[in-house]
Image: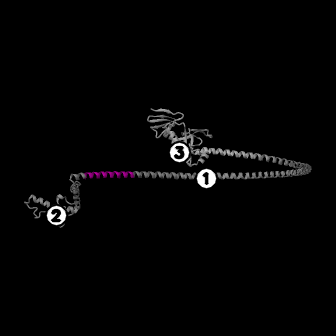
Amino acid sequence: MARFVVAGPSEYLAITGWGIDDVKLAKKAWVFAGQKCSRFDISPVNYEFNVEAMSSEKLAFNLPAVFTIGPKITPAPALEVDGASNQRRVLMPESEEALLLYAKLIAPHDHASNHVKQLVKGVIEGETRVLAASMTMEEIFQGTKKFKQEVFDQVQLDLNKFGLYIYNANVKQLVDEPGHEYFSYLGKKTQQEAANKAKVDVAEERMKGEVGAKEREGLTRQNAAKVDAETKVVSVRQQGIGLREEAKVKAEVQVYENEREAEIAAAQAGLAMKKAGWEKQSKVAQVEAVKAVAIREAELQMEVERKNALRLTEKLKAEQLSKATVQYETQVQESNAALYNRQKAADATLYEQVKSAEARKAQADAMFFEQKLAEDARLYAKQKEAEALAMVGKAKVEYVTSMLQALGGDYGALRDYLMIDGGMYQEMARVNASAVSGMQPKISIWSGADGAAGEAGAGAMQQVAGVYKMLPPLLSTVHEQTGMQPPAWMGSLPKDGAN
């Protein structure tokens, strides 16, 4: 039976079986018969390790670290709002390949089990040792931050094969192995260097203080004498500046007064020039006004005369145009009437020709139709005659075939029968009779060999023998006249030269 399964907030469902090629991951799904559903936790787990490593100088040290590791979760779909259309678009999540690897390789085991812990520890220790073996202790100690970052990067590359992700990593201070005091000596060295540096810094500061005090005392005296001298210089300079400024002010006052007088004179001269210009402009304006009036009067007079000339011209043109128009329209009407009459006559002639042609065409069509009917009748008669001949010929063929079968296939007997049935011999006798009619034929009488055909006492057999003796000459005569051979049962004609 089907059942609906829902995973918890920190869980996923791994479904396999019927209808699924590999593994299906979901937060909720229907599980049908033939399918198997497994839950697995995706919450990260803290793994605390004390990694033992060795630098390139064969110096051992411990690297205490705490890693927060879990499956790499694909972020959920997010919504993005388009500013132009104010529409929401769904941003699809990234590939779920890492989570699928975790479900196949790690999920069957408890993520807090020793198996997973040993797997993670092996990866971290292996990468840390490989990286530490390529660096000196000084490089590791001086570049601790860089060293830690490289360890994290290399470990993450290996954990990607299992779908795991380092969410957080905290590496503590490097610690010496028991029996090795490199970091402690290095710390003492650093402390001593700091103490010595502090002493040097104290002495330097004391020296700077004493020297600074003497320098300040000397600078104070120097500055006091310098200030007195500068005060006297400034006093004399101020007096000179005062006298100079007073003379400058007097000169500026005199210059200003002169400029004012010059401006007044220039203003008076300008006023006089403007008055003269105004008077000149006034007189010119009066003269121009008088001339303009005269010019305008002349222009108006010319306009009046031009209008009169145009009026007379238009009047003459109108008179001439009216006459020409009347004459033109009269001629046009006459031409149109003549053209109309010619068109009507041409239309009548054309109509008669068209009707005559149509009559001739109708007559020709009637004659063609009659000829076609006569030809069709002759053709039909020929077809019927041919069909009758074909039927007669077919009947004759069937008749001859049946007679030949009745005579046993004897072609000669069939020929003789057809000649007798068709009256061939009677026709031959009639033709021969008509051919010899009115003639005096030479009649030959054949008798016996001994010339005693008519003697008394001859027997009946002699008469029959006489008849048979007459047959050869008779058959020879028929053959000579018709070319026909006697039937085989009657005998054969004698050869040439035989008696």
Between 151 and 433, the residue placed more toward the observer is 151
Between 268 and 357, the residue placed more toward the observer is 268
Q: Which circle, 3 or 1, is nearer the viewer?
A: 3
Residue that label 3 marks:
126
- Figure check: 25 above or below 240: above
Residue that label 1 marks:
339
Q: Is residue 498 visible?
A: yes
Q: How is the image coloured?
A: one colour
Image quadrant in which you'd find residue 156: top right
Mark 2 vs 1, N-terminal side: 1
Tell me the quarter of the image containing the C terminus.
bottom left
Q: Do the residues bearing badges 3 and 1 touch, measured as CB atoms within 8 Å?
A: no
Q: Is residue 248 visible?
A: no
Instruction: Judge from the rendering whether residue 349 lies leftward or rightward of residue 415; answer left or right.
Output: right
For the point 45% across and 36% down, the residue is 35
Callout 2 amino acid: Ser
Question: Which type of secondary structure does the marked residue at label 2 adopt?
Answer: loop
Mark 2 crowd level (few <14, some 14–19, many ≥20, 10 Å Cα): few
The span from disc 3 to disc 2 (Cα, nearest Å) is 156 Å
Q: Which residues are magenta?
A: 375-400
Instruction: Judge from the rendering whether residue 309 lies leftward or rightward of residue 153; answer left or right.
Output: right
